[in-house]
Image (tube, helix red, strand yellow):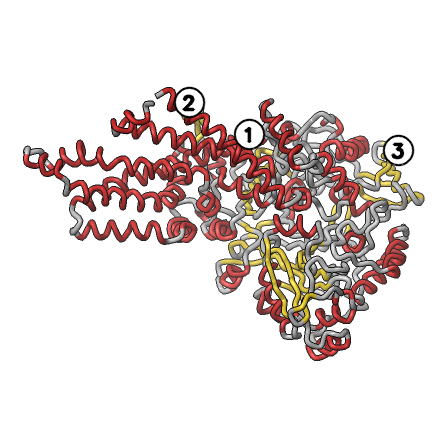
Amino acid sequence: MNIRRLRCATAALALLAAVPAMAEDLVIGLRAGPDSIDPHWSTLGSQAEALRHIYDTLVDVDDKLQLKPGLAVSWEPVDDTTWEFKLREGVKFHDGTDFTAEDVKFSIERIPVVTGPMPMTLYTKYVDSVEVVDDYTLRIKTKGIAPALPNDFTRLFVVPSETGMEAGNEEFNSGEKAIGTGPFTFVSWEPKGDLVLEKFDGWWGGDVAWDNVTRKEIPDDAARVAAMRSGEVDLINYVPASDYLAMQNDADLETFVSDSVYILNVQPSQAEPLPQKVKVNGEEIDENPLKDARVRKALDLAINREVLVNVVLEGLGTPANQLMPEGFFGYTDKIGAKEYDIEQAKALLAEAGYPDGFEIDFTCTNNRVPGDAVVCEALAQMWSRLGLKVNAQALNGTVFFPAAARKEYSMAMSAWGTLTGEAAYTYGAMIRTPDADKGFGNFNRTDYSNAEFDKVFDEGAQTLDADKRRALYEEASFIAMDDRALIPTVILQTVWAAEDGTLSFTPRVDQETRAYEITPAQ
Amino acid sequence: MLGYLVQRLAQAVIVVFAMSIIVFVGVYAIGNPIDVLIDPGATQEIRAKLIAQYGLDQPLWRQYLTFLGNVVHGDMGTSMVYNIPVVDLVFSRLPATLELVFVSVCIATFIGIPAGLYAGYRPDSVAAKAIMALSVLGFSVPTFWIGMLLIMTFAVNLGILPSGGRGDVGSFLGIPTSLATADGWSHVIMPALNLSLFKMGLMIRLTRAGMVEAMRTDYVRFARAQGLTDRQIVFSHVLRNISIPIVTVFGLELGSTLAFAVVTESVFTWPGVGKLIIDSILQLDRPVMVTYLVLVVILFVLINLTVDLIYARLDPRVRLKGGA
């Protein structure tokens, strides 16, 4: 903490008078903040990240997205359709009331009543009923076999049952009902403005380093960097690649880099006919070359991932060989690093009947994640070396996503993050043949369908034994990637920055900036 | 005068109607907001339920009629992202934008007009040439770039002004405003200056052009012959005669600044409405987009009306014609 900031902080504290003079404050500049203080309103990552400071979730995740105890200390299936959760004892809400199983039951039941267009119900979709066994034991009856229920509950924020079903957004935003068991208590918030928090002394997770935390929302990249450089904030997230290079050469600043969960995937459509038809020698053809696995493999082989990472993304990425980062539940070791082999790619393309290549439209987003537009253009160039003519078009997400949902693109690329840390979330949504009854394939924009994959995946989804399920998901991952159902390109990285030697902080793959996991540098 | 007012207000209502239809059709053409907002993990069932809940499965005309029906009952809708009534949301951010625009317009007027007068009065002096060069800079250099430059200079290097945000908000006549506190002023001054540069350039050039032209006219010569001092001539005759174009441009600029101070608000993290509308567009938050754009139309209509009334005050000929 530099002198000027210390002086400002002291002055502010002197005004507050009640706070002891040794207080430590933390001000963070973030690209996005919450949309509401109601923890059951939206599933947005930035929302969960902010509200985690006030409320706790039933199950928590570590910095690699592996499950760890939260308000529940343990969980296990009792039978095929029942999960039992043992709750932590001695936990207090900010208003002093005790945390019990009733509060969890209430929170689960509140979700469908209050959730908005980014529905939290997706985390409770397997819940059939909730049974309170005693104050610290909870049984959840599930609709069918639900092995991923604990993963879903990593976003289950718990509010006291006294909150009442009628409490709405207003009561939460004003702070009246903003009561959780989390490390900080709510002080104030305004939409797109600052979220001000104060340490909660009775937190079960132990002592946190900061008495006061202010999370400032600064969406403009340059403004966020300027706020950090001028000492107005102590830490910022999402440092843009251009500033990252300069910061590395600046001894006064420290950067923290981590892989994120976000991977840019190419999505070749299997539709027949293609929504945007492919042209061979200037003539539109009716067949879909992307249906041929050899063509998809050729596209894959022609991607030079080293160049994408080191040149296009300025080093802020890692080559991806499947749809999830290493270490996630269902990640398979059977796929080695992707190779770049343009000759083999050309041979495959010729074998598939396109020796002279073809012309294809390629659409992607340009504002969803850092680097999406540049990777898109780079891919088009790489494929042109293969003999294809690729019309790359980078669009705003507002235009891209509704059109992608209408399946208007022959070949698209967008980022996907395995937010629950396990394969079912990703493979079930994007690769599994769509099945509305089972809730699978809801994000399958490519019409990909592979009976062998479906069989293995479905078996995994019906297996409660974690080891067996992991093996099945790994096999499913292998089948889908060997078939190039989608073509992963690069894992994006996230950068945080702070003044050198001020903070100690371990970056997380889910990109969350958790104030209670940050400490002043020793 | 009254008939004129009624006519103008009737026009306004038609414009607002037309605008709401255009916005509705435009947003409908982009696609379903649920597809932008929804979490990728949501099942088909959840998606279908949501689309029905927000009435997005209805045909366009029915959605529009529902919207109109709600408006008649005083309900402009609730933001899909913030779950706050749109009117509350917009009005909670409006004071921030208003104070920013107010300060920037004052800077532009109180520096721009005197500078322009001087540049027109002594067009060949070095100072006049310097003023003109600065005015060109004001138009031609992008706002965000000057904004960043100001931040780098005053916040990062000199450390005398904050780099962004609104600062302490005090209360003046019951209205929450940063202009009531010293900290608030330190926050507002840089973005306001940034926002005023373009308008200042415009003011300088308009005033100078009018001044140069007016000084050659007969009435100035006669006034001189009468023995009036230059000060009397400029302030009581010339300034009044060249005000009409200035007032027009001032009105237009005021409207567009109020509605679209987006760039400055982004660079300086100013929590105003400009930022709100951009965020809403990016998330297809339809109720906010429609309401905001309709409000902007109303704003423009009101500003133009005021400008016309000021004309009438300045130039009696307008009053005679418009009085029908």
> What amino acid is at disc 3?
Val
Task: Name the chain under label 2.
Answer: B
> Which residue was labeled with disc 2?
B6
> Which residue was labeled with disc 1?
B87
Closer to us: mark 1 or mark 2?
2
> Which residue was labeled with disc 3?
A133
Residue extending farthest to the top is B2
Spot occupied by residue A520 in the image (x, y as percentages of width and height) = 57, 50
The quadrant of the rendering that contains the N terminus of chain B is top left
Whether residue B106 sits left or right of residue A265 in the image: it is left
> What amino acid is at disc 1?
Val
The quadrant of the rendering that contains the C terminus of chain B is top left
Q: Name the residue: 34% across, 43% down.
A: B199
The answer to which quarter of the image holds residue B167 is top left
Closer to us: mark 3 or mark 1?
1
Q: Name the residue: 55% across, 29% down.
A: B88
Q: Are marks 3 and 2 in contact (CB under 8 Å)?
A: no
Q: Name the residue: 54% across, 36% down.
A: A20
Give the structural element (helix, strand or loop) at label 1: helix
N-terminal label among 1 and 2: 2
Relative depth, front residue between A121 and A28: A121
Residue A336 can be seen, yes or no: yes
Q: Are marks 3 and 1 on the same chain?
A: no
